[in-house]
Image (spheres, grey):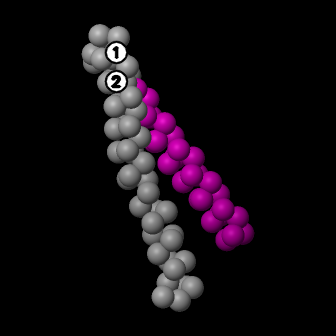
Amino acid sequence: MNLSQRSDLTQSVHRSSGSFELVLGAVIFGLIGLLIDRALGITPVLTIVFTVGGLIGAVVSIFVRYRNQMAELGAQRS
């Protein structure tokens, strides 16, 4: 595999990481919320709160990266 192919593969992996980020962020935070809920005996309150928080955090992260990438592409075209 030459350098160009590795670069293309790396860029593809970075582009596809958004889907993993959306799912894993919500799942991991949801599991943390579930563990805390079970310890406190208030299941599903924190599970829902943490899951939504993880999802919102992932969406914001992807949006900010998208805006930055579009700004870079716009600067390159100018």
Q: Which mark is residue 47?
A: none
Residue in view at x 46 percent, y 42 percent: 59
Q: Pinpoint residue 48: horizontal percent, then vertical percent.
A: 33, 23
Which amino acid is tagged 1? Ala
Q: Is residue 63 above or below residue 36?
A: below
Q: From the image, which quarter does the C terminus lie in?
A: bottom right
Q: Who's the residue at 44% across and 57% down the image?
A: 17
Q: Main secondary structure of the magenta part?
A: helix
72 left or right of 49 in image = right
Q: Position of residue 30 (x, y in %)?
A: 35, 31
Binning the other alpha carbons within 10 Å of mark 1 as few (below 14), some (14 to 19) or many (20 upward) gives few
The answer, for residue 32, to whether it is visible in the render is yes
In depth, the one of 57 and 70 nearer the eye is: 57
Bounds of the magenta span? 50-78
Residue that mark 2 sits on: 35
Q: Which residue is situated farthest in the bottom direction here?
A: 2
